[in-house]
Image: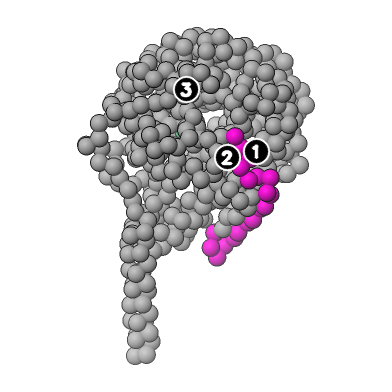
């Protein structure tokens, strides 16, 4: 008994010491930098002559009338005990009615001063049934593109923004490698249709988040929590991206097309910087969330692991730098708490002590700087393909924009090759699980009349674009 007590005592003392020594080391070598915003004059900015000043949207979130994809089904598949998937049991329905009102929306963009616009093509509209392409839908997007170009707004197409046609899901969707052939047929067709008018392309929006949310954490369709499936879907999306990239490079008549990969960048910090297991959890969370994919584009090797549980590796050297630009979607950073009982052995929370957006996300503008610095090592130009704020009362939008554009200006001043910035979003829209309450739009949308109104806070963005229009020669 006495001996056991001794072992317990010295064992605990040893673990405590180990915890201390390692966290002291980590606290010194991995700092948690924060800028003192009270001493920063955010009006001191400058931007290049040629710069993409855009806004971003996605089809499902604004178009309306989409009843043939996985999200349509998801909204109608309650969770356990009948709890609705979407806040307040909302349905996307007509969303911002952009499919009808797109001509007016292009005018709004032009009046605002944007010189770029990123939007997604809805696969389930283009190919409503397997192998049947809808020419009317193709012509709709062609008209949108032509109107953008006539208004001197550079289009960027996203081929996939979270939604899959129902027929594709029924065939096993992203879980099956052979289904990549369907994806490639759709992607190829879109490139053939629009390559003469559209220079900027992106494959999947946030294809790190899609497998995490859909197959590991289960919040997005198909709502699974299976590490192996999560990694398999990640692999198939990586393959889909690389194949699309290589195919577009081959098909490109001008060789000027820019095909990018867009990921959701979310740095993870240990919640308790004096607890080694929080550090470990933050390390694994960041790897699973984004680092493994980024490493794939740097080395050709994708490797994810949950210690003592499972691991997965996929290698393809064609993946190395398979992109003309790296698209960063940046909103916030997160804190990670170790929890042995969660399927991933951690959970994510927001860092306390920061102003928050309506999404509850901590506002951390300098994180954009650190993200660019970190991913510049990929060796390709960077585009900030999304950044923005949910702010229904429009009280923090102006400051949010000032701070983020100041950070962007500092990034450029430091010499990083960033080609553009797309504010999320042009219009208020359907914020996935959160429904319509979260208001990201430069323009407010009245969901009864679909009237658009420019928000006061958005004028900060307009002011900068007026001062630095970014329309210089190539
Ligand atoms: C990233 C996604 O691409 C977009 O669909 C979403 O609305 C914004 N983040 C805000 O959450």
Vertical relation: 342 (above or below) 430:
below
Name the residue at 43% across, 31% down.
387
Who is closer to the viewer here, 95 or 33?
A: 33
Q: Position of residue 154 (x, y in %)?
A: 54, 19
- In this rendering, does residue 251 appear at all? yes
Mark 3 vs 2: CB contact within 8 A = no
Q: Quickly name the residue at label 1.
A: 241
Nearest-to-viewer mark from 3 and 1: 3
Q: Is 465 left or right of 261, judged from the image as shown?
A: left
Q: Residues within 10 Å of mark 3 (few under 14, many from 20)?
A: some
Name the residue at 57% across, 24% down.
156
Q: Is residue 318 magenta?
A: yes
Mark 2 vs 1: CB contact within 8 A = yes
Q: Position of residue 382 (x, y in %)?
A: 50, 35
Which is nearer the N-term, disc 2 or disc 1? 2
Q: Position of residue 427 (x, y in %)?
A: 45, 20
Q: Secondary structure at mark 3?
A: loop
Name the residue at 39% across, 51% down.
269
Q: Quickly name the residue at label 3.
A: 50
Q: Residues within 10 Å of mark 2 (few under 14, many from 20)?
A: many
Q: Is 7 left or right of 433, judged from the image as shown?
A: left
Query: Which numbered circle lies on residue 207?
Result: 2
Question: What is the span of residues highlighted in magenta in the rendered image?
Answer: 306-324
Nearest-to-viewer mark from 2 and 1: 1
Vertical relation: 208 (above or below) 453:
below
Looking at the image, which residue sits at the far bottom?
A: 2
Between marks 3 and 1, how big is the CA–CA gap? 28 Å
Please identify the quadrant where the N terminus is shown.
bottom left
Which is nearer the N-term, disc 3 or disc 1? 3
Name the residue at 45% across, 40% down.
372
Q: Quadrant of residue 132?
A: top right
């Amino acid at each position: 008994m006495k001996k056991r007590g001794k072992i317990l005592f010295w064992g605990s003392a040893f673990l405590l010491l180990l915890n201390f020594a390692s966290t002291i080391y980590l606290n010194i070598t991995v700092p948690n930098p924060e800028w003192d915003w009270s001493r920063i004059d955010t009006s001191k900015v400058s931007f290049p002559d040629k710069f993409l000043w855009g806004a971003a949207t996605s089809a499902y979130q604004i178009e309306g009338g989409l009843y043939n994809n996985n999200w349509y089904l998801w909204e109608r598949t309650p969770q356990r005990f009948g709890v609705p998937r979407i806040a307040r049991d909302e349905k996307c329905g007509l969303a911002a009615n952009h499919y009808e009102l797109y001509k007016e929306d292009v005018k709004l963009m032009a009046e605002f001063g944007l010189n770029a616009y990123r939007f997604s093509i809805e696969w389930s509209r283009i190919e409503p049934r397997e192998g049947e392409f809808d020419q009317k839908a193709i012509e709709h997007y062609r008209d949108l593109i032509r109107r953008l170009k006539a208004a001197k707004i550079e289009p960027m197409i996203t081929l996939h923004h979270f939604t899959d046609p129902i027929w594709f899901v029924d065939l096993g969707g992203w879980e099956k490698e052979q289904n990549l052939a369907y994806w490639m047929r759709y992607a190829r067709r879109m490139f053939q249709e629009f390559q003469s008018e559209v220079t900027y392309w992106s494959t999947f929006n946030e294809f790190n988040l899609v497998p995490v949310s859909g197959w590991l954490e289960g919040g997005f369709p198909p709502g699974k929590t299976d590490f192996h499936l999560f990694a398999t879907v990640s692999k198939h999306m990586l393959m889909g991206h690389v194949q699309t990239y290589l195919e577009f490079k081959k098909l490109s008549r001008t060789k000027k097309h820019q095909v990018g990969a867009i990921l959701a960048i979310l740095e993870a910090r240990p919640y308790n910087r004096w607890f080694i297991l929080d550090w470990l959890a933050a390390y694994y969370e960041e790897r699973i969330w984004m680092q493994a994919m980024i490493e794939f584009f740097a080395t050709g090797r994708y490797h994810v692991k949950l210690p003592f549980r499972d691991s997965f590796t996929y290698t393809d050297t064609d993946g190395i730098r398979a992109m003309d630009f790296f698209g960063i979607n940046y909103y916030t950073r997160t804190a990670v708490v170790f929890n042995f009982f969660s399927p991933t052995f951690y959970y994510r929370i927001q860092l306390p002590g920061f102003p928050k957006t309506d999404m509850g996300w901590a506002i951390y503008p300098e994180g954009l700087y650190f993200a660019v610095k970190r991913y510049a090592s990929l060796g390709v130009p960077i585009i900030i393909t999304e950044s923005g704020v949910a702010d229904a009362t429009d009280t923090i939008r102006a400051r949010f924009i000032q701070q983020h554009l100041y950070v962007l200006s500092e990034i450029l001043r430091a010499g990083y090759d960033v080609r553009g910035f797309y504010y999320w979003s042009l219009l208020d829209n359907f914020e996935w699980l959160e429904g319509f309450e979260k208001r990201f739009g430069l323009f407010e949308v009245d969901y009864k009349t679909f009237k658009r109104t420019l928000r006061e806070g958005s004028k900060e963005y307009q002011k900068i674009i007026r001062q630095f229009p970014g329309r210089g020669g190539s």
